[in-house]
Image (cartoon, grey):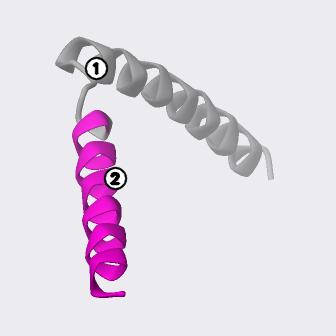
Amino acid sequence: MIHKKTFIVGLLTSLGVCSYAFSQTKSKAVIGTELSSSRKKIDSLDKLLIAVLGSR
């Protein structure tokens, strides 16, 4: 019984560590590209919001 609990805890810990390691794999270039596209979307929405509020 104790061995099963130890195995389950070890397995869950291993899965958590692996998922954390794999989530850190993006390079700075990929992150920069994603941020750039997001900033463009935000800028276009800002311009639209300013236009709509300015017309009122």
Q: Position of residue 53 (x, y in %)?
A: 71, 51
Above or below, 19 against 30 in this view is below
Which label belongs to residue 1? none
Q: Which residues are magenta?
A: 1-22
Residue at 69% across, 35% down = 48
Question: What secondary structure predominates along the stretch shown in magenta?
Answer: helix
Say which of marks 1 and 2 sits in front.
Answer: 2
Q: Nearer the viewer, residue 45 or 23?
A: 23
The extreme right residue here reads 56
The extreme bottom residue here reads 1
Residue at 62% across, 42% down = 50
Q: Amino acid at mark 1?
A: Gly
Q: Position of residue 46 (x, y in %)?
A: 57, 39
When asked about the image quadrant of residue 22, the answer is top left
Left or right side of 13 for 4: right
Q: Nearer the viewer, residue 20 or 51?
A: 20
Residue at 25% across, 27% down = 25
Residue at 36% across, 87% down = 1
Q: Position of residue 8 (x, y in %)?
A: 36, 70
Instruction: Identify the element where label 2 is drawn.
Output: helix
Instruction: Identify the element where label 1 is drawn.
Output: helix
Q: Which residue is mark 2?
A: 15
In this rendering, the count of numbered labels is: 2
Q: Which residue is mark 1?
A: 32
Mark 1 surroundings within 10 Å by alpha-carbon count, few (fewer than 14), some (14 through 19), many (20 or more): few
Above or below, 18 against 4 in this view is above
Whether residue 32 is in magenta: the answer is no
Q: Amino acid at mark 2?
A: Leu
